[in-house]
Image (cartoon, helix red, strand yellow):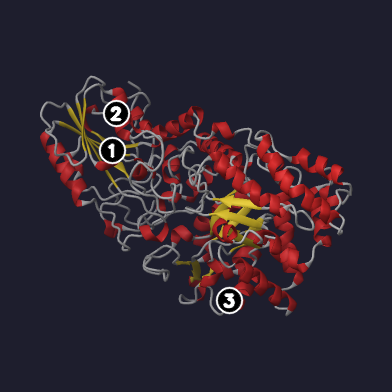
Amino acid sequence: MPSTRLSRTLLSRLSNGHALVALAIAAVVLPVVAAGCAKGKAPASFPYLDPAVPVDQRVSDLLGRMTLDEKVGQMTQADRGAVAKDPSMVTSLGLGSVLSGPALVPADDTPSAWANLVDGLQSRALTTRLRIPLLYGTDSVHGDNNLIGATIFPHNIAMGATRDPDLVREAARVTATETRATGPQWVFAPCLCVSRDLRWGRTYESFGEDPNLVIQMETVLEGLQGKGTGDLADPTRVLATAKHFAGDGDTAYGTSTSFAYTIDQGVTVTDRAHFDQVDLAPYVTAVEKYHVGSIMPSYSSVDWTEDGVGNPVRMSANKELLTDVLKEKIGFDGFLVSDLMAIQQLPGDYAAQVRAGVNAGIDMFMEPNSAPRFARTLLDEVRAGRVPMSRIDDAVGRILTAKFELGLFERPFTNRGNIGTVGSPEHRAVARRAVAASQVLLKNDGDTLPLRSSQRVYVAGVNASDLGNQAGGWTATWQGAPGNTIPGTTILQGVQHYAANVTYSADASAPTAGHDVGVVVIGETPYAEGLGDVGNGHTLNLSGTDRANIDHVCGAISTCVVLDVAGRPQIVTDELAKMDAFVMSWLPGSEGAGVADTLFGDRPYSGRLPVTWPRAESQEPINIGDKDYDPLFPYDYGLTTARR
């Protein structure tokens, strides 16, 4: 093939904007690819390279041209850190995917640097024999949260409190737009878990405890992917990942054997009827209504009570649920991606773990630092006949289908046309609206709220002025961190916008005299996954500092409001009588001013609890529908106010 023709073909695929970057990539890639054509690399006349050919035919054509090594490469995902150490891995293994976990970000954590990182790896992938593009994945669980400067939304539990599927869809659309404009085409979100125990460190990643609420909020999938697979190539869309299939929010306390976790990655002890109704139901909707493109199996296990408790099966090896139920019965036609090193928790040596995962139905394997070992091992397993070739072809066909539907063969490089919208005022306005809609008013004696701008306000508590705490985990880093880790507005800044006379004292040590109202902001500090499990250094009880702040401020100022900034309900039973008003503010993300919008009546309180609020930690697990249900605040509770 003449190099000039190849150059025109590839240059026509380069994305909008940043032409100099695109040309620089082309300058590296084109000579290599052109030279490769003389050695028998794929000419553009092959059917799989023709966008006019139906996707299923393109997949079939490409599969028929691939070697076993190339197929195994497509099933292999390495992380950005490992690839940075050995960039040749992209071509030597023919990697199907690269991911950026938290902290695995460019040294220059900017939108352009992200796009350059992804495009640089993509340029390498396009030098392989068949020019199969890479799929790049990132978390984006509440905004493009690995990118500092992105719009950070409230976590899912707060979005569940809004009871607003349209708003959830709009927020997801913003997340998809910001993510894809900076390179990644695939997000490991949303979590469709049904959280049944507040002691779980991932409670805030769930929309709530009722599967019907989770299903209602699955408009998040439409916001990410669009209305159908035909929308996936749009620069405002990404491939979504429903996780963690299935039962991860329903594991029994004390069953986890991972690290010091108490509930995360534990065992769902259940009968099939309960599992279908509670844990499986959201995935049926995700597949049948929203055609989710990928699903991530859980680290957790299932132990069926019908055959006697004591023989749990890890989801990564659960062929009954992954293949027989999800793929065959429900009809999931996307691909399954393992969680981070999940197969390494399976019994046996590494070969047995790989074999079990593939034969159970997992299609792509997140082996961040073990990609070469995984590829070698799977090749050996296939050649030995322990993994059938039909299983490999099924897995690779599913992965290739997603790549074709995303338009990566035609437009492999990042479309940067929306890069200027990252963290834009318009996007932040959507997040601020979501914060306001998520606020749940739990007590409001004497119509204390909304406040008046003329009131002299005393604000206490670290969480009033800490962006890291109000964003929570999965923000800039895996665990998140206190401090001004991201740009945004704090709750304090929101209060100062509305009230002219504001005193702030993080430890409530400033004089309280002369103030009309005290606002005490309590809550949690960031955590993620099992590190946030109760019993693993955490409790649902308020900290001593928070209790002292409530006692001091509410005892000194005649009108007292308490805001709880946390990823789950906390035990406030003994403190509640001291408050005139109590608001659950959740983890609002980058736009803390949204908390003040309701506090001062610019927007009404309308949120409702997506989970049951216990009287004591010992009540957990407690969920709507339980026998002898007697919580402090029931599921779906929330007072309303009018705009002032």
Most foreground residue, 485 or 618: 485
Examine the image and state in which quarter residue 366 appears: bottom right
In the image, what residue occupies the spot 64% across and 56% down?
A: 97
Q: Quadrant of the C terminus?
A: top left
Most foreground residue, 169 or 179: 179
Alpha carbon separation for disc pair 1 and 2 = 9 Å
Instruction: Give, as a three-letter code, the residue at label 3.
Output: Tyr
Answer whether labels 3 and 1 touch (C-beta < 8 Å): no
Q: Which residue is mark 2?
A: 495
Alpha carbon separation for disc pair 2 and 3 = 55 Å
Instruction: Give, as a three-letter code, the residue at label 2.
Output: Val
In the image, what residue occupies the spot 46% across and 77% down?
A: 310
| Element on which disc 2 rests | helix
Instruction: Give, as a three-letter code, the residue at label 1.
Output: Ala
Q: Which residue is mark 3?
A: 350
How many residues crowd mark 1 within 10 Å: few (<14), some (14–19), many (20+)?
many
Answer whether labels 1 and 2 touch (C-beta < 8 Å): yes
Most foreground residue, 231 or 634: 231
Most foreground residue, 145 or 547: 145
How many residues crowd mark 2 within 10 Å: few (<14), some (14–19), many (20+)?
many
Q: Position of residue 5 (x, y in %)?
A: 86, 43
Q: Which residue is mark 1?
A: 464
In the image, what residue occupies the spot 76% across and 57% down?
A: 128
Examine the image and state in which quarter residue 296 appears: bottom right
21 lies left or right of 8: left
Q: Position of residue 68 (x, y in %)?
A: 76, 68
